[in-house]
Image (cartoon, helix red, strand yellow):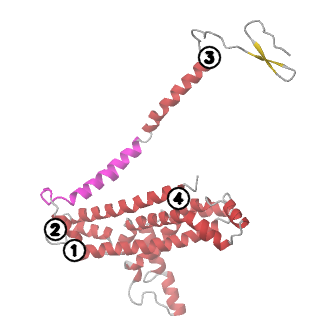
Amino acid sequence: MTTASAPGGSAFAPGAGTAVPVPAATSAAPASVEPSGADAATRGAGTRARRRPGLAWLGLTPFAAYVLLFLAVPAVIAVGSGFTTGDGAVTLANLAAFGDPSVLRAFGGSFGLSAVSAVIGAVVGALACWALSALRPDGLVRSMIDSAASVLAQFGGVMLAFAFIATIGVQGLVTTWLVSTFHVDLNADGAFLYTVPGLVIPYVYFQVPLMVLTFMPALEGVRSQWGEAAATLGASRATYWRRIALPVLAPAFWGSLLLLFANAFSSFATAAALISQGGIVPLTIRAQLTSETLIGLQNVAGVLALGMVVVMAVVMGAYSLLQRRAARWQR
């Protein structure tokens, strides 16, 4: 069968018994095309959409002003004061405070308190997350626990200290009940709650909910298909957790542990309500602000603040790196 030319410059391509029209390309394009009303509206909407980010940044102005006035400026002043004398002259002699035994004990107490409370909070919180993963995410029990964790993670300061004083203090309810019932005195060797090791108990109280909030998304990111695929290949339950689940969850777990460490390291109000003397860095800074105790050195509080900033920067930097790695499995 042959093809025939159609008028108007179109041709027909050969087919299986059929003729398919193939329009020919025109030699010239129209000089100008007026946009329709819909195109003009779309273009105007796109222009407005491109302008919205600039206006959206204005919504951050109050928050940025708050961060600048109440966080950034005080931090710069506090750290900068460690490099000046009482007359305002710049000096590095104040850094000698890091060699003072009392300062070293304060950092040692903060590191020990933060590490112990972070490890206990991370382990207990991870087990709680594993138990919560069996519940429906939109169920009533799960919603109540998530809400309670959000509140208790921020519950601290004088109210938390008073709660533990009324519970396990020298005359607390649990303390007197143990003495009268089992003849067990929690404070036989002294008021344990009012010491640096005793701070571990109230610190764990807000560390566990914080672990639940930070680690639960990572645990929910573990897909059930991975376990099914491992079982299909003959892997046991223990092999699945050792070779698949735990390596995937490890970055999130260690990142949450570092976050708990930073949370305890920077806490002040609860410790200040329970301990009047130093023992940890925040309380030592308070003592230095009220009365200079290191002879021959000035602005020691600023030097201690510098040490805290360095520690927090290292910890949060490592936390950020671990979170980036953990986020790959949560996409």
* Disc 3 element: helix
* Residue located beneath label 2 in the image: 297
Which is nearer the N-term, disc 2 or disc 1? Answer: 1
Q: Assess disc 3: are there few (<14), some (14-19) or many (≥20) residues with their C-alpha within 10 Å of its C-alpha.
A: few
* Disc 2 element: loop
Q: Which residues are magenta?
A: 61-90
* Residue located beneath label 1 in the image: 100
Q: Residue at x 50, y 93 (%)?
A: 183
- Which is nearer the eye, 87 or 214? 214
**Tag 1: amino acid:** Asp
Q: Assess disc 1: are there few (<14), some (14-19) or many (≥20) residues with their C-alpha within 10 Å of its C-alpha.
A: few
Can you tell which quarter of the image residue 314 is in? bottom left
Q: Assess disc 4: are there few (<14), some (14-19) or many (≥20) residues with their C-alpha within 10 Å of its C-alpha.
A: many
Horizontal arrangement in the rendering, residue 155 relative to residue 195 (left or right): right
The residue positioned farthest toward the top in the image shown: 7
Residue 67 among those drawn in magenta: yes
Which is nearer the N-term, disc 2 or disc 4? Answer: 2
Say the numbered circle drawn on residue 37. Answer: 3
* Residue located beneath label 4 in the image: 326
Horizontal arrangement in the rendering, residue 316 relative to residue 85 (left or right): right
Between the C-alphas of marks 1 and 4, the distance is: 40 Å
Q: Assess disc 2: are there few (<14), some (14-19) or many (≥20) residues with their C-alpha within 10 Å of its C-alpha.
A: some
Say the numbered circle drawn on residue 115. Answer: none
Q: Are marks 2 and 1 in contact (CB under 8 Å)?
A: yes
Q: Nearer the viewer, mark 2 or mark 4?
A: 4
